[in-house]
């Protein structure tokens, strides 16, 4: 009977000693994922699901953006659309800790006149996350003079004005200010 008791007591001691190691590993994993989330939250991400009549490279533009070193810069991020693609999900990521100050725009490409249907846009930065449906795009974005919007078909149609073609959707100042407020 004493041998059984000693054996059980030894097993309990050994199992208790290995438990703290598991807990430490789990704590480390939780800390790492929290740090990764904190790091990820400082990146502005814009994802667009769209269809276009003419494939052309799309560009995210942030004009006159303040950098951490006290300078201002125009930032352009281009996503290629292959010649055989008419629908695509595009993801733009701004550099970490860089947010637009006054202007954030999406250029549809200046080479060809086209029709663009935006199925959805997801805009996120930190705790801020907007899932924008095709019906709500104009609530968040404005068009410039090179873009007309067809309410019935929910399609953006680009056009030339005075021989120039530069169609851009511009994020409304209200949402730029909300992004700046999180920074």
Image (spheres, grey):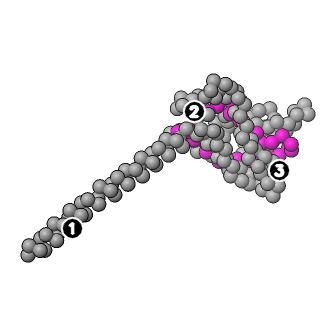
Between marks 1 and 2, how big is the CA–CA gap? 56 Å
Q: Is residue 6 left or right of residue 68?
A: left
Q: Position of residue 104 (x, y in %)?
A: 68, 33
User: Pointer 2: what residue?
Assistant: 179
Nearest-to-viewer mark from 3 and 2: 2
Return the disc, 1 or 3, that comes first in the chain's sequence: 1
Cα distance between the residues tagged 3 and 2:
32 Å
Foreground label between 1 and 2 = 1
The picture places residue 57, in percent across and down from the top left corner, at: 78, 46
Judge the density around disc 1: few (<14), some (14-19), many (≥20) Cα neighbours within 10 Å: few
Q: Which residue is mark 1?
A: 11
Q: Residues within 10 Å of mark 2 (few under 14, many from 20)?
A: some
Say whether residue 131 is visible: yes
Residue 26 found in image quarter: bottom left
Helix, strand or loop at disc 1?
Answer: helix
Badge 3: few (under 14), some or many (20 or more) residues near its Cα, within 10 Å? many
Q: Earlier in the sequence, mark 3 or mark 2?
A: 3
Residue segment shown in magenta: 99-126
- Which residue is at the front of the view, 90 or 116? 90
Residue mark closest to the camera, 1 vs 3: 1
At horizontal 64% and vertical 46% (from top left) the residue drawn is 47
Does residue 14 sit above or below 133 in this rendering? below
Distance from disc 1 to disc 3, alpha carbons, whole Å, reads: 71 Å
Quadrant of image for the N terminus: bottom left
Q: Which residue is mark 3?
A: 54
């Amino acid at each position: 009977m004493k041998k059984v008791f000693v054996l059980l007591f030894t097993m309990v001691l050994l199992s208790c000693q290995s438990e703290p190691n598991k807990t430490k590993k789990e704590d480390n994993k939780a800390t790492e994922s929290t740090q990764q989330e904190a790091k990820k939250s400082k990146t502005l991400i814009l994802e667009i699901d769209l269809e276009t009549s003419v494939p052309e490279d799309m560009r995210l533009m942030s004009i006159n953006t303040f950098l951490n070193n006290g300078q201002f810069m125009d930032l352009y991020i281009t996503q290629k659309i292959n010649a055989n693609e008419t629908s695509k999900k595009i993801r733009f990521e701004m550099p970490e800790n860089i947010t637009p100050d006054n202007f954030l725009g999406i250029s549809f490409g200046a080479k060809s006149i086209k029709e663009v249907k935006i199925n959805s846009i997801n805009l996120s930065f930190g705790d801020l996350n907007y899932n924008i449906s095709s019906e709500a795009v104009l609530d968040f974005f404005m068009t410039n003079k090179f873009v007309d919007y067809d309410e019935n078909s929910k399609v953006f149609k680009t056009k030339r004005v005075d021989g120039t073609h530069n169609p851009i959707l511009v994020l409304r100042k209200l949402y730029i200010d909300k992004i700046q407020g999180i920074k």
